[in-house]
Image (tube, rainbow, N blue to C red):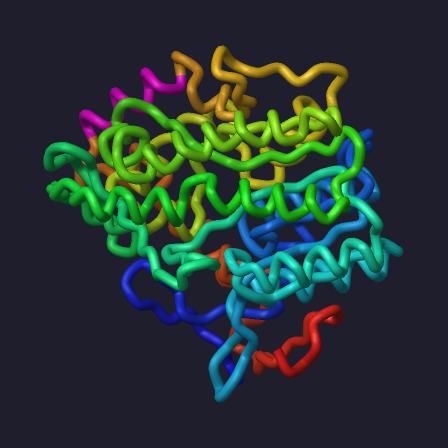
Amino acid sequence: MVIKPKFRGFICTTAHPAGCAHHVRQQIDYVKGQKPVQGPKNVLVVGASTGYGLASRITATFGSGARTIGVFFERPAANNRTATAGWYNTAAFEKEASEAGYYAKSINGDAFSNEIKQQTIDLIKQDLGQVDLVVYSLASPKRVDPETGEVYSSVIKPVGASYSNKTVDFHSAAVSDITIEPAAEQEIEHTIKVMGGEDWELWMDALKQAGVLAEGAVTVAYSYIGPEITHSIYKEGTIGLAKDHLEASAGRIREQLHDLAGRAFISVNKALVTQSSSAIPVVPLYISLLYKVMKEKNLHEGCIEQMYRLFAERLYADSTPVDDRGRIRIDDWEMREDVQQEVLALWERVDSENIKSISDIEGFRSEFFNLFGFEFPEIPYEAEAEPDVVIPSIPAAE
C-alpha cells in the first residue's frame, strides 16, 4: 500500500515503516559517530519505542555496547492499517542491533500491569541475569491500577485558576489565544496516578525483590520544567504536580537502592517535538521559537543528542553533576539566560503574520512528521510499502 500521513486532531494515525527505519538509523549513526560511553552493560528501558526512551536504548546499545530489553505498548499492522511508529521504530532498532552483534529483545504490553513486570523479570533472569541501568520513560494518557483495576486518565490543565495565552496550530501556522479552565481535584489526582512516580516505584520494587538489579544499579526517569511562559500549563499545572510526585519517588527509590549502592535520578530534559508535547497547548509555539533561537546559536539538540550527553557527560561521567534538588539538568542550554531572553522577546511579537519568519514552525512541523516516518527526502513515499513488519523478538501473534 501507498502510505500517507493521516490525522485525527494532533495525532498522526498512520506511520511509514521505511521512514521510521531511516529515522532510527539516523540516531544510530549519530551515536556511532561519537566517542564510546563507558556506561551500562545490561539495560531495561520502560517506554522504549519512541522519543527519549528509544534514544536511551540506542545510546546504551551503540554508545556503550549494552544488551537491552525494551518494554512498550504498540500496535502492529492489521486490516489495511499501519502499525504505530513505535512498532516500526523497534523493528528497525532490533534489526540494526542484531546486525551489529548486540542483544536486543522487546516486550509489548501494558507496562503498568503486574503481568508485564513479571514477564520482564523472567526475561532478565533468563538472558541477562541482572540489569545495571533502568530507564523509566513511560508516556501514556491512561493507566489501569494493577491491584484495583480502576482506570485513571490524565489531563493537561492549569491548577487553581484558568489560564490564557497564545498557542499555535502547527499544521496551519495560525496563532490564536486560548483559555484553559482549571483542573478539578479528581483530574489532578488521576494525572498524578498516570504520570507521577508510583509505577516507577513499583517497577523498581519488583526488580529488586526479584534480585535482578545489579550492585550499583542506576535508574533514571525523565522530566521537564521549562520557562515561565509555559509554567501555568506545565510546571504549575497537572503535569507539573505529577512531575513533583516523580521527583519524590526518586528520593524513595534512592533509599530503596541504598543497600545495593544504587542511584536514582530525575533528568530534566530539553523541550522537544514529541507526540506528547505536540498536544499541549502553548508548548508547540514556545518550541517553535526556542528552535529558532537555539539553532541560530548552534545549541540545538534532538532526543538522541540529549541522551548521548546524558549518558556521556552526566550518568557515566566521573561524577554526576546535579542541581540543588538532586536533579540532572540537560535542559541547561535551553534555560540559558540569553536563550530565554530572546525567546521571550519573540513571544511578545509572534502572530499569524510573522510566525514563519521569526520562528521555526516549519522545523516543528517537519520534526512532527518525522516522528511517524514522514517527510524524509530519502524515502520514496509514492512507492508501495509493506505495512506488516515483524519485530524479531516478539511473536507474530502479538
- Percent x, y of residue 391: 69, 70
- Compared with residue 233, is residue 338 higher up or lower down, i.e. above or below? above
Q: Is residue 315 magenta?
A: no
- Percent x, y of residue 311: 69, 31
- Compared with residue 188, is residue 315 higher up or lower down, i.e. above or below? above
- Percent x, y of residue 2: 51, 81
Residue closer to the observer: 179 or 20: 179
- Numbered range of the magenta stretch: 339-349
Q: In the rendered image, which quarter is residue 65 located in?
A: top right
Residue farthest to the bottom, as pictured: 79
Q: Is residue 299 visible?
A: yes
- Percent x, y of residue 134: 66, 41
- Compared with residue 202, is residue 309 higher up or lower down, i.e. above or below? above
Q: Is residue 345 magenta?
A: yes
Residue found at x 67% / y 81%: 396
Q: In the rendered image, which quarter is residue 38 located in?
A: top right
From the viewer's perspective, is 107 left or right of 340? right
- Compared with residue 17, is residue 164 higher up or lower down, i.e. above or below? above
